Image: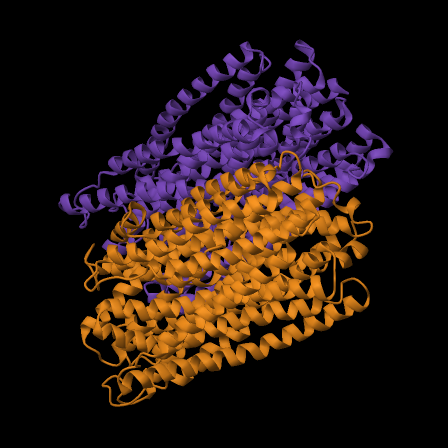
Chain colours: A purple, B orange
Amino acid sequence: MEIVTAILTFACAAFALLFAVFKARSVLKHSEGTDAMKKISASIRQGTNAFLGRQYKIVIVFFAIMFVILGAMAIANLLTPYVPFAFLSGGFFSAFSGFIGMKIATSANARTANACRAGLNDGLRVAFSAGSVMGFTVVGLGLFDISVWFILLKFVFGLSPSEITGAMLTFGMGASSMALFARVGGGIFTKAADVGADLVGKVEAGIPEDDPRNPAVIADNVGDNVGDVAGMGADLYESYVGSVISACALGVAAFGSIKAMALPMLLAALGVISSVIGTFFVKTKEGATQKQLLRSLSKGTNLSAVLIAVISFPLVYLIFGKDNLSIYFAILAGLIAGVLIGQTTEYFTSDSYKPTKNLAATSETGTATIIIGGLSVGMLSTLLPVVIVAVCILVAYFVSGGAVSASMGLYGIALAAVGMLSTLGITLATDAYGPVADNAGGIAQMSGLEPIVRERTDALDSLGNTTAATGKGFAIGSAALTALALMASYIDKIKSIDGGAIKVANLSITNPTVLVGLLVGACLPFVFAALTMNSVGRAAQSVVKEVRRQFREICGLMDGKADADYASCVDLCTKASLREMVLPTVVAVIVPVITGFVLGCSGVVGMLAGATATGFLLAVFMSNSGGAWDNAKKYIEGGNHGGKGSDCHKAAVVGDTVGDPFKDTAGPSINILIKLLSMVSIVFATLVVNFSIF
Amino acid sequence: MEIVTAILTFACAAFALLFAVFKARSVLKHSEGTDAMKKISASIRQGTNAFLGRQYKIVIVFFAIMFVILGAMAIANLLTPYVPFAFLSGGFFSAFSGFIGMKIATSANARTANACRAGLNDGLRVAFSAGSVMGFTVVGLGLFDISVWFILLKFVFGLSPSEITGAMLTFGMGASSMALFARVGGGIFTKAADVGADLVGKVEAGIPEDDPRNPAVIADNVGDNVGDVAGMGADLYESYVGSVISACALGVAAFGSIKAMALPMLLAALGVISSVIGTFFVKTKEGATQKQLLRSLSKGTNLSAVLIAVISFPLVYLIFGKDNLSIYFAILAGLIAGVLIGQTTEYFTSDSYKPTKNLAATSETGTATIIIGGLSVGMLSTLLPVVIVAVCILVAYFVSGGAVSASMGLYGIALAAVGMLSTLGITLATDAYGPVADNAGGIAQMSGLEPIVRERTDALDSLGNTTAATGKGFAIGSAALTALALMASYIDKIKSIDGGAIKVANLSITNPTVLVGLLVGACLPFVFAALTMNSVGRAAQSVVKEVRRQFREICGLMDGKADADYASCVDLCTKASLREMVLPTVVAVIVPVITGFVLGCSGVVGMLAGATATGFLLAVFMSNSGGAWDNAKKYIEGGNHGGKGSDCHKAAVVGDTVGDPFKDTAGPSINILIKLLSMVSIVFATLVVNFSIF
C-alpha cells in the first residue's frame, strides 16, 4: 500500500508539473505583439521581479530566524530533527508556487492582449493556459513536497506513521508563513497602488483607468501580479498541502496505520488527473456571450468534480474495504459544500442577483447608504456558508464513524477539505486566468490597441470575477475545515507528549481557560484585519502623495509630452508593503506561543476554535462586501442609476475603494491566519506543555 | 439571612424609586421657558408618546403569544406555573423603565434649555437630575421586581432556592425581549430620522442642523428620546436584572443555599445607596471648562465606585465568613474591569487621543480612506477590552475557588458582572443626561434663543459623549460576563432535568455539535447586525423621500413662510421602525429553540459561546467605529483639516452617517441579543431535552 501510494503520488506530481511545462510552452509560443506592448509588459515584469526579489530577502531573514529557533528546539529534544528542514521546504515550495505563477502571468499578459486581437477564443486559450500553468504548478509542487517527504521519512528514515505526520505538519507551517507574507505583502502592494491610481488619476485628475499618463499605472498592474497571482499561488499551495497533511495526521491518529494517509494523498493525486482531463473541455467559439464563456469554464470544472466524485468511490473501497465505505460520503460532502459556498458567494456578489442590484440602488441616496448597504450584504452573506459548512461538518463526522470514535469523525472532516480541494488544478486555473486578462486589458489600453481588443479582454476579465467567486468558496470553506482538522491534530499532539494528556483533559467550553482562549482567538482576526487595512491605508496615502507630486512637478505629463516616473511608484509600493507585511505575520507566529504559556494547552484549543469561527465569518463578510461593492460599481458603469460619472457612480467608486482592502488584503489573509495559528501551536506544543502556567 | 435580604433589597428599591420621584419633582419645578419652547417640547413629547403607544401595542401581541406558549408548556409540566407570570413582569418593568425615562427626558429638555439661559451650572443640574430620575428608576424597578418575586416565591409559595432562581431567570427573558424591541425599534427610529434629516436638510438643502424648516427635525428629536432614552432604559434594566439573577442562579448551584443569592442582591441594594451619595457630589461652577465639567461628573461616579468597593468587603465577610472572603476580589475585578473598558473606549473614540485624531487626518485623502480608517480603528479597539475581560474572568473564577469547584468559579464571574453594574444608578444618570442636553440644544436652536444657550447645551452634550463612552464600557463588559454566567446557568438547568446530564456530558470543543453550534452562534451577531442596519437603511430612505417631497411641494417652506409637516415624518419613522423591529427579535427567540432541536443541548452551549464571543467583539467594534467617526467629524468641525464645509468635513459626515447605525442601533442591540439567546435557551430547556435529535 505505502509503496503504491508513494509512487502514484510522486507520479501525479510529476505529471502535473510536466503538464504545467507543456502549457507554459504553448503560452510562450504566442507573440507579445507590438513594440509598445513589449515595452509595457517588460516594465510590469521588471517591477514584479523587483518586488518579489526584495520580498524574498526579508522572508529569508524570517525563515533563518525560525530555522535557528526550531533547530535549537530540535537539539533540546523538543522537536524531531526533521522539523526545521520540513519547515524550510514548505516555505520554499510555497514561495516557488507564487514565483512560477508570477513568471507565467507576466509573460502571458501581453500575449493574451495580442491573441485578443485575433479573437476572443484565442485570448481565452492563452489566458486560460497561463492560469493552468499556475494551477498545475501549485498542485504539482504540493504533491511533490508531500510525496518526497513521505518517501524520505518512511523508506529512508523508517519512521512510524505518527512521526511522519508530525514532521509533515511542520512543512505546513513553513508553507503557511510564506503564504501569509505573500498574501499580506502582495495584498498591500496591489491595493495601495490601486487606491492611489484611482484616487488621484481617476477621481482628481479625471483621466481614464489604465491611462499611461497616470504615474501609478504600472504599479497597479504590477500589483495584480504580486497580489492576485503570486499571493494567491502561495496561498493555495498552503491550503492544498495543509488539507492533505492534516487529513494524514488525523487518519493516523484514528487508524494508526499508513492506509489512512494513503486516502488523502491518492485523492489529491487522482484529482490531478481529473483536472487535466477537465482542461481539455474549456474552449469557446468567437462572439461567445458572457454566459457561453462561463458555461465553457464551468464545463471543465464540473467535469473534473464529477470525475473525482466517481473515482474516489472505488478508491475508498480499495483502501478501507466495505466496512468503512461510508467515509466516501465525507469526501462527497466536501466537494458539494465547496460548490454550494461558491454559489452563495456568486449570489451575494454578482450583479445578476438581487443583493448587488439593491446595493447599487442604495447609491441613489448617497455614499453613506451604499457603505452601510455593502457592510450589511457582507454580514448577511455569512449565514448560508455557515449553514453549509455546519451541515458538511456534521455529515463528514458522522458518516466516517464519529459516533463510534471521535478521531474517525475528525478524519472525515479533514477528508471533506481534501475533497473540496482535490480539483484545485482546474479551479485555480479558472481563477488565476482573471488577473492575466486584467493585465492584458491594461496593456491593450496603454499601448493604444483598437477598442475591440479591450472589449474582449474586459469580457474575459469580468468572467474572471465570477470564477474568482467560486474559487473563494473553495478557499474559505476548505480553510474552515482544515483549521478544525488542525485543531484536532493539535489535541492529538498534546496527548502524545508525556504529561500532555492531562493538559487537555478538560476542553469543556465552560473551563475558564478555554473560554478566555476563545475570546482571545475570536479577537485575532479582527485585530489582524485592522492591521492589514491600516497598512493599506498608510501605503496608499504615500502613493497618493507621490502621484500628486508627479502631476504637479513633471511638465507636460498631462499633455502626453513627458513620461511619468513609473518606477518611483513601484518602488514606493514595494517599500511600503514590505515594511507593513512583517508585523501581521510575526503576530500570527507569536500569539499561539504566548497563549500557550499563559493559558495552557486548553487555552490554545479555545483560541484556535475562536479564531476559526470568527476568522471564517470575517473572511466571508469582508470578501463578499468587497465583491458586492465592486460589482455594484460595474453595474452602474453598465448604464444603470445614471451610469459612469453620475453621483451614484461616485458613491459606488467609494464603496469599491473601501471594498478593495476588504476583499483582496484582509479577507484572504484571514484564511491563512487561522491555519497558521494551528500549525504554530502544533510545532511549539512540546515547549508549551513543559513551560505553561496552567 | 433571607428575611434581612428581602427587607433590605425591597427597602433599597423603594429608596431608589423615592429618590427618583424627588429628583423628578425638582426637575418639574423649573419653567419650560418661552411659548415657542413649550410648543416645540410639546411636539416632541407628542411624537414620543405616539411612538411608544404604538410600539407597546405590537409588543403586547408578542408577549401575549409568548404567554400562551409558556402557559401551554407550564400546563404540560415543562415549566413551573410561575414562569409565564415572571416573564410578563420582566417585560412590563423593562418597558416601564423606558417609559419613565422617556417621560422625564421629554419634560426636562425645554427646562434644561431654559435653565441654560441662566447659566451652565443650572443647566447641568436640571439635565443631570433628569438623568438621575432615569438611573434610579431603572435600578429601583429592577430591585423591586427582584425583591417582590423573591418574597413571593420564598415566603408565600415556599419554593426551594433552585426553583426560585429558575423562575427568576424567566423574568430576565421577559426583560431581554422587551429591551431588544425597545433598542431595535428605537434605534431604527432615531437613526432613520437622523440620517434623513442630515442627508436632505444639511447636505442637499444646505440648512443648519435643528433648523425648524427641516421637516424631519422634530422626528430627529423624538428619535433621541425613543432610542437613546427609552431604548437605553429598557436595555440597562435588562442588564442590571440579568446580572443579579444569573449570579443568584449560579450561587445557588454552587452553594445550594440562599446565602449565595443574598450577596448579589445586597450588593445591588447597597449600590443604590452609594449611587445616591455620589449624586450629591456632582455640581459645577459657572464658566466651567469641559475638563472641569467632566471632573465634576467623574467625582460622583468614582466616589460611588469607591464606596461600593469598601462596603462590599464587610458584606462578603458577613455572608460567607473568612473562608470565602476572596470572593470579594471577584467583585473588585468586575468594578475595575468596567472602569478600564470605559477608558479604552474613551481612548479610541475621543478626539483628545491619537486614534480619532489620525482618523480625522485620513479625511484628507477622501471618503474611502476615512471609512477604511474608521473600520480599522473599531476592529483594533477590540483587543484591549478582550484582554481586560479575559483577565477579569480568570481572576474572578480563581479567587472564587474555581480551581476547587467550577460552579464556585462561575459564580465569581457572575459576581464580577454585578460588581460592574452595582453603581448603575449614578453611571446611568451621567449617561442618560446626554440625550436631554442634546434635545435642549435642538429646542434652543429651533426657538431662536440667544447663541450662548446653544453653546452651553453643546458643552453639556459633548460631555455626554464622553460619559456615554464610559457607560458603554460597563454595558458591553457586563453583557459578556452575564452572558457567560447565563451559559453556565443553562448547563446547570439541563443537568437538573431528568436525562439531561448526559446531553451535556460532552461539552468538549471538539464535539462536532459543540463546534457547529459555535459556528452558528458566531454567525448570529453578524446576521443580526446586518438585519438592523438594513432596516435603518430602508427606513432612512423613506424619510429622505418624504423630506424631499415636502421641500418640493410646500411653497414658502424654505423662506420660513410656511410650516413643515413634522407629523408626517414622525409617523413615517414610527411605522418604518415598528415594522422593522419585529424580525430581529423573533429571530433571537426562535434560533435557540431550533438549534436545540437540531443540534441538541451541547449544540446550544456551543451556540451561546460563539454568540457571546463574536457578539462581544462586534459590539465593541461597531460602537467604537461609530464613536470615532462621530468625534472625528466634531474634531474637524472644531476647525481642523479645513473645518466645517471643507471636503474633509464632507468625508467625515459620511463616516459619521455610516457610524450612526453602527453605534446606536446594531452595536447596543447585540449586547441584549447575546443574553436573550441564553435566557430563551434556559426557558425552553426542558422542551429541548425531551425532543432534540442529538
- For the residue pair B11 and A657, the one nearer the viewer reads as B11
Q: Residue at x 25, y 60 (%)?
A: B649
B119 displayed left or right of A402 = left
User: Which residue is at the front of the view, A155 or B306?
Assistant: B306
Percent x, y of residue B161: 71, 55
Count of numbered marks? 0
Residue A171 or residue A514, whichever sits in front: A514
Q: Is residue A544 above or below residue A325?
A: below
Q: Quadrant of residue B466?
A: bottom left
Q: Residue at x 36, y 66 (%)?
A: B433
Say above or below: A79 vs B406: above
How far across and down, in percent of the image, does residue B1 sit? 63, 54
Question: Quadrant location of residue A164?
Answer: top right
Spot occupied by residue B295 in the image (x, y as percentages of width and height): 29, 54
As drawn, is B445 to the left or to the right of B679?
Answer: left
Whether residue A310 can be seen here: yes
Asked if residue A653 shows in the view, the reply is no
- For the residue pair A657 and A124, the one nearer the viewer reads as A657
Residue that lies at the very extreme toward the right in this rendered image = A322
The spot of residue A253 in percent (x, y) is 72, 26
Q: Quadrant of residue A635?
A: bottom left
